[in-house]
């Protein structure tokens, strides 16, 4: 009964001490349960939230900030701007990550995505787009228009900064 009452209040109401009151739950098990709940909350439940702001999108790419080579990633989004999938399209060398519209859109088509967000990092530390970045963004926007999958944003991530094509009215 105690367990049922605790769970009816939701997982947020569970504490280390309350878990220890459950028969068969020891210190190690309580710690593992809390860790599992936190992991689920951080990584599974947030995927249901719409990615409406530039900050929402940038937070999905923080893991490539300090990479030593360029990573080119793509998010497939549904019609409500919720994440369907996140994929690494290419991993490049120090200052180049080659991407082509066919590689970017192949999985988005299979996902039946309404839109995509692409991002890549600049290990140099400068988040400003190069001419190649601008050209690729224009190609992706044109390909997306033909396919009916909107290029919602292209984000460039550096160690301490970021650049959003949408935020700068370039999309």
Image: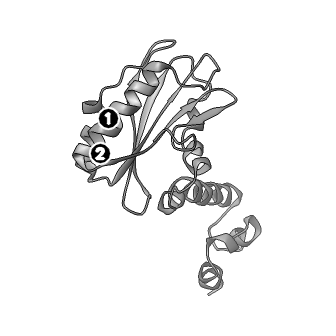
What residue is shown at x 33% (from left), y 31% (from top)? 139
Badge 1: residue crowd in 10 Å (few <14, some 14–19, many ≥20): many
What residue is shown at x 30% (from left), y 49% (from top)? 149
Residue 15 x %, y %: 73, 68
Locate the C terminus by quadrant. Answer: top left
Badge 2: residue crowd in 10 Å (few <14, some 14–19, many ≥20): many
Quick check: 150 left or right of 13? Answer: left
Residue 45 x %, y %: 52, 61
Locate the N terminus by quadrant. Answer: bottom right
In the image, farthest residue toward the front = 169
**Tag 1 and tag 2, C-beta contact below 8 Å:** yes
Quick check: 77 left or right of 47? Answer: left
What residue is shown at x 58% (from left), y 31% (from top)? 157
Residue 50 x %, y %: 50, 60
The residue nearer to you, when weighing 37 against 110, is 110
Asked if residue 109 is positioned above or below residue 133 in the image, the reply reads below
SS assignment at label 1: helix
Quick check: 16 left or right of 38? Answer: right
Quick check: 47 left or right of 102? Answer: right
Q: How many marks?
A: 2
Residue 94 x %, y %: 51, 12
Asked if residue 93 is positioned above or below residue 140 in the image, the reply reads above
In the image, farthest residue toward the top = 94
Q: What separation in Å lies between label 1 and label 2 (alpha carbons)? A: 7 Å
The residue nearer to you, when weighing 38 against 146, is 146
The residue nearer to you, when weighing 158 against 128, is 128
SS assignment at label 2: helix
Asked if residue 43 is positioned above or below residue 142 in the image, the reply reads below
Can you identify the residue that label 1 sits on? 104
The residue nearer to you, when weighing 69 against 119, is 119
Can you identify the residue that label 2 sits on? 108
């Amino acid at each position: 009964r105690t367990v049922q009452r605790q769970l009816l209040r939701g997982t947020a109401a569970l504490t280390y001490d309350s878990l220890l009151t459950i028969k068969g739950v020891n210190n190690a098990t309580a710690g593992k349960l809390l860790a599992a709940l936190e992991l689920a909350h951080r990584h599974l439940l947030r995927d249901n939230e719409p990615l409406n702001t530039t900050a929402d999108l940038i937070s999905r790419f923080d893991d490539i900030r300090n990479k030593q080579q360029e990573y080119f990633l793509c998010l497939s989004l549904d019609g409500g701007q919720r994440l369907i999938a996140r994929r690494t399209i290419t991993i490049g060398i120090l200052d180049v990550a080659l991407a082509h519209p066919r590689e970017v859109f192949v999985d988005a088509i299979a996902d039946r995505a309404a839109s995509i967000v692409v991002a890549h990092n600049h290990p140099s530390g400068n988040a400003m787009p190069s001419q190649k970045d601008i050209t690729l963004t224009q190609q992706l926007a044109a390909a997306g228009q033909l396919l009916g999958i909107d290029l919602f944003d292209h984000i460039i991530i550096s160690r301490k900064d970021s650049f959003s094509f949408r935020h700068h009215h370039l999309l």
